[in-house]
């Protein structure tokens, strides 16, 4: 599978490593070249300096041929915007994005985005661990 | 009218000031507490501290009764999300977003935000009008950008000089509506001969602009 990941933070870098080690073709985009130091040394994919909310950067990252796009920058709005570009402009078959704010997650789910809120997921997980 | 302005930077501040002086009810939503304080000091208590992209903040701001919602922060993605929340959650009838990257105009339109204002584009248009060497100037957009009115100056080096319009084979869909010559203004006909320094006012489609420019100004 060809995957474009926007945001090379802890989550982005780890996801890139996981997919890469399973043989997928991964491109990671970040606006800060320093972030790429989080990638594992064995990473065989592409690390590209660029803004995932800019169509030209996305094209350079190979969004037109990508099977999936994941937006995991620190900014909810950046993730939302990039995910909408990938879905509605480039028609990427599978698009996922992280939205910390549970209310915004709810709204964008109704607007057709596949969004995950770490806030909700983690709170649920912690509760389950506490109660078990 | 009740108008909500998201972003209390320079654009938001002066925009709100102008809207207030026209008698509108204005509320600015701004994240930064120091900016909120300054706005309140200068314009009165018309500012709310909070994130204009959050549904909870917009609810508190009474967004469902807003007639107009304007997002003018300096981040395109924040403006997009604020506008989408206002449109889809609160059904605000009119929405305007400021954009920095001119390419986002098409994107925002596709995502349901019809009216965008791009400072970059506005300044570029003014530069084109002010710089006399520019052979093609955008004067006006019609029908939401599907048509445009442009002014083309015929340089003396152009291959079109001395030719009649019927010899030029202008792209179908481009219409020359006016020729401004030294001696006055004419409505062009197929027999009109072009001269150097003529200025043409044409209606064209954006995708035909390059072809039109090549025919009229190419050497």
Image: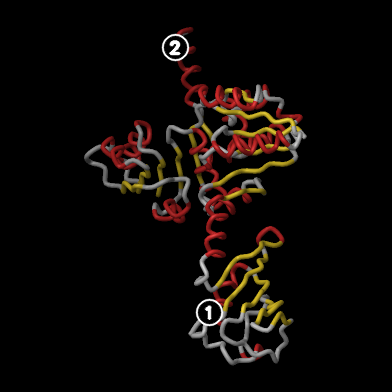
Residue depicted at x 50% and y 33%? A76
Instruction: Name the secondary structure under disc 2.
Output: helix
Instruction: Name the secondary structure under disc 1.
Output: helix
Residue depicted at x 59% and y 92%? B162
The residues bearing labels 1 and 2 have C-alpha atoms spaced at a distance of: 70 Å
* Label 1 environment density (alpha carbons within 10 Å; few <14, some 14–19, many ≥20): some
Q: Chain of mark 2?
A: A
Q: Nearer the viewer, residue B57 or A72?
A: B57
Seen as rendered, the residue at the extreme front is B183
In the displayed structure, B146 sits above or below B198; it is above
In the image, A49: left or right of B7?
left
Q: Nearer the viewer, mark 1 or mark 2?
A: 1
- Evaluate whether residue A1 shows in this view: no
Task: Find residue A130 and report its horizontal and vertical position in percent.
Answer: 45, 8
Q: How many marks?
A: 2
In the image, A61: left or right of B131?
left
| Residue at numbered disc 1 | B214
**What kind of colouring is applied to the model shown?**
secondary structure
Task: Find residue A38 and report its horizontal and vertical position in percent.
Answer: 28, 35
Q: Chain of mark 1?
A: B
| Residue at numbered disc 2 | A129
Residue depicted at x 55% and y 22%? B37
Seen as rendered, the residue at the extreme left is A41
């Amino acid at each position: 599978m060809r995957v474009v990941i926007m945001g090379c933070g802890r989550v982005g870098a780890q996801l890139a490593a996981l997919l890469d080690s399973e043989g997928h073709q991964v491109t990671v985009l970040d606006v800060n070249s320093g972030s790429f130091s989080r990638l594992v040394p064995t990473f065989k994919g592409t690390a590209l300096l660029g803004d995932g909310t800019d169509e030209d950067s996305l094209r350079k990252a190979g969004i037109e041929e990508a099977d999936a796009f994941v937006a995991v920058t620190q900014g909810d709005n950046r993730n939302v915007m990039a995910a909408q570009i990938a879905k509605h402009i480039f028609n990427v078959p599978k698009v996922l994005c992280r939205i910390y704010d549970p209310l915004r997650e709810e709204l964008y789910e109704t607007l057709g985005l596949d969004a995950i809120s770490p806030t909700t997921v983690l709170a649920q997980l912690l509760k389950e661990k506490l109660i078990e | 009218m009740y108008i909500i302005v998201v972003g209390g930077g320079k654009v938001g501040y002066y925009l709100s000031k102008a809207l207030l002086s026209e008698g509108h009810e204005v509320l600015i939503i701004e994240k930064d507490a120091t900016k909120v304080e300054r706005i309140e000091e200068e314009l009165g208590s018309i500012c709310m501290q909070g994130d204009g992209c959050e549904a909870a903040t917009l609810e508190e701001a009474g967004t469902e009764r807003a007639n107009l919602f304007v997002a003018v922060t300096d981040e395109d993605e924040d403006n997009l999300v604020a506008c989408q929340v206002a449109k889809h959650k609160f059904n605000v009838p009119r929405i305007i977003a400021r954009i920095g990257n001119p390419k986002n105009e098409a994107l925002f339109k596709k995502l349901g935000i019809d009216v965008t204002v791009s400072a970059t584009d506005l300044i570029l248009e003014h530069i084109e009008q002010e710089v006399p060497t520019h052979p093609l100037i955008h004067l006006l957009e019609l029908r939401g950008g599907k048509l445009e009115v442009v002014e083309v100056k015929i340089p003396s080096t152009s291959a079109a000089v001395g030719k009649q319009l019927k010899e030029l084979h202008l792209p179908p869909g481009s219409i020359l509506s006016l020729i401004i010559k030294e001696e006055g203004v004419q409505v062009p006909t197929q027999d009109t001969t072009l001269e150097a320094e003529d200025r043409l006012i044409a209606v064209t489609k954006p995708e035909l602009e390059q072809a039109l420019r090549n025919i009229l100004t190419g050497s």
